[in-house]
């Protein structure tokens, strides 16, 4: 675990991220809050590209809880069979759709607690939905952010909740809204797990990672 970077270094890091991409976007295809919720739930232990491939056709006709229930478990299972753990995920999506219809008038709740009470929706999924759809400055820590936080010293922590707290505590408020997007994209395309592309990294001179590649 790298040492925690100081405030001024972190401010400079995120100033550079912001200058390069002022409005970073999530890469999961969605058309509304419901399809976003479903897409993020399906993305657990799967790639965004793989989820998008399965959901692009699905969401063209199924974009509400009611339509999902009409499609049914068998139809959804077939539609997402290319996604890892698709059988359990299909069951979760059908059940959460039933709950949305029964308890929330088919609307996706904007409460983290309510979201996390839905089948297949954990803290990370809830935070993504809150951030992207309702612009709440929540931090969804995935494997990329956990790796980068500890490798660079931006937000080190022994588990995902510790890293989430480190982001909230150490990254300046002006960058909180987009912080997790910048970190995810940086981890996905530059600070990769096996072969980090340090030569292409815009924060190489500020990073605490000792084993930088040339």
Image (cartoon, rainbow, N blue to C red):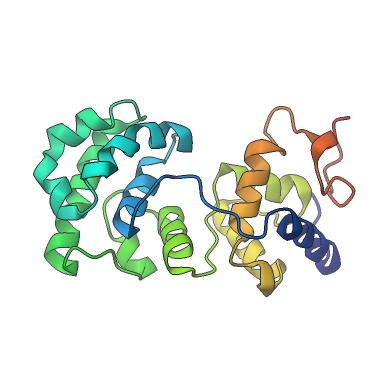
Work out whether 48 lies above or below 31: above
Query: Which quarter of the figure has residue 111?
Result: bottom left
Q: Which residue is drawn at 26% across and 38% down?
A: 58
Q: Which residue lies furthest to the bottom in this view?
A: 173
Q: Which residue is drawn at 71% across and 38% down?
A: 190
Quadrant into which the C terminus falls: top right
Does residue 121 appear anywhere in the picture?
no
Q: Which residue lies furthest to the left in this view?
A: 70
Q: In this view, does 168 lie to the left or right of 33?
A: right
Q: Which of the two residues, 114 or 19, is positioned nearer the viewer here?
A: 19
Q: Is residue 124 left or right of residue 139?
A: left
Work out whether 22 lies above or below 197: below
Question: Percent position (x, y) of residue 143?
Answer: 57, 42
Question: Percent position (x, y) of residue 50?
Answer: 42, 31
Question: Percent position (x, y) of residue 28?
Answer: 44, 45
Query: Which quarter of the figure has residue 213?
Result: top right
Question: Percent position (x, y) of residue 12?
Answer: 82, 62
Q: Which of the two residues, 49 or 149, is positioned nearer the viewer here?
A: 49
Does residue 58 appear anywhere in the picture?
yes
Q: Which residue is drawn at 55% across and 58% down?
A: 161
Q: Which residue lies furthest to the front in this view?
A: 60
């Amino acid at each position: 675990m790298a040492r925690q970077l100081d405030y001024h270094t972190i401010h400079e890091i995120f100033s550079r991220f912001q200058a390069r991409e002022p409005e970073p976007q999530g890469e999961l295809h969605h058309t509304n809050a419901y399809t976003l919720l479903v897409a993020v739930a399906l993305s657990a232990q799967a790639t965004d590209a793989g989820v998008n491939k399965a959901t692009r056709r699905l969401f063209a006709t199924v974009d509400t809880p009611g339509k999902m229930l009409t499609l049914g478990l068998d139809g959804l299972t077939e539609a997402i069979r290319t996604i890892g753990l698709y059988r359990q995920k299909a069951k979760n999506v059908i059940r959460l759709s039933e709950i949305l219809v029964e308890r929330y008038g088919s609307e996706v709740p904007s409460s983290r607690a309510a979201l996390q009470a839905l089948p297949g929706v954990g803290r990370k999924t809830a935070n993504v939905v809150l951030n992207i759809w309702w612009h709440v400055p929540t931090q969804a820590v995935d494997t990329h952010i956990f790796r980068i936080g500890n490798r660079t010293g931006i937000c080190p922590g022994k588990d995902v909740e510790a890293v989430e707290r480190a982001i909230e505590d150490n990254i300046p408020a002006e960058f909180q809204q987009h912080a997790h997007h910048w970190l995810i994209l940086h981890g996905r395309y530059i600070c990769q797990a096996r072969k980090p592309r340090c030569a292409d990294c815009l924060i190489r001179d500020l990073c605490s990672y000792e084993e930088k590649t040339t």
